[in-house]
Amino acid sequence: MAAPILALTSSLSSLSFSSHVAQNPSVVSFPKSRSVSCGTLTRTPRPIMASASVAPPEALQSADLKKYVKSRLPGGFAAQTIIGTGRRKCAIARVVLQEGTGKIIINYRDAKEYLQGNPLWLQYLKVPLGTLGYESSYDVFVKAHGGGLSGQAQAISLGIARALLKVSEDHRAPLRKEGLLTRDSRVVERKKAGLKKARKAPQFSKR
């Protein structure tokens, strides 16, 4: 009878409680506390820290640009003197020129951001000013709507060229030579009845 008792006590003494006892013998670690109610286990809710709402930098930049444009154009676009209107396909752009450092702002956004960094569309904007050597002499403010970004970029180019005529009539000859004062009248041809598109016809079967 004494032998089984000695074996039981030795086995109990060999058990390890390292998973429940921390390095400090006076501190005991326990699993996460759970509240028991009606035979179901429910976790105790953790405190949620409320974070202060901060506006994204893009929104702040757009708001700052809007204030900047309104401060530079008192009375709005219609009250300015050096203004030109350009059109291309379904796009219409109103352009205002002011003496500055060469900034181009379209619909209260930077031109590179608005035109998605497309080098061809950005080149359309630079050609009229570059032809006369005014790349860093004027700031360009644009309101554009209708059509796509490609049509708007070409409409802005025509608007800049027409606005430069308000600066001096001597600019007409170099701008006309580069074809920057010609309104491109090409538009999408309308669809016809009985055809799939403007000219594409359904497949013809003789029999």
Image (cartoon, helix red, strand yellow):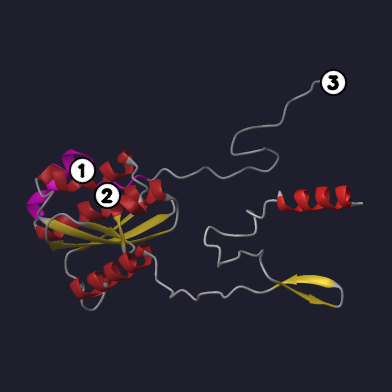
Relative to the observer, which residue lies in front, 54 or 206? 54
The residue indicated by pointer 1 is 127
| Mark-to-mark CA distance, 2 and 3 | 53 Å
Q: Residue at x 65, y 59 (%)?
A: 20
Q: Residue at x 71, y 39 (%)?
A: 194
| Badge count | 3
| Mark-to-mark CA distance, 3 and 1 | 56 Å
Mark 3 is surrounded, within 10 Å at the Cα level, by few (under 14), some (14 to 19) or many (20 or more) other residues, namely: few
Mark 3 or 1, which is nearer the eye? Answer: 1
Q: Residue at x 60, y 34 (%)?
A: 199
Q: Position of residue 42 (x, y in %)?
A: 76, 71
The residue indicated by pointer 3 is 207
Left or right relative to 199: residue 169: left
Q: Amino acid at mark 3?
A: Arg
Left or right relative to 93: residue 80: left
Label number found at residue 146: none
First-in-chain label (2 vs 3) = 2
First-in-chain label (3 vs 1) = 1
Q: Position of residue 175 (x, y in %)?
A: 16, 45
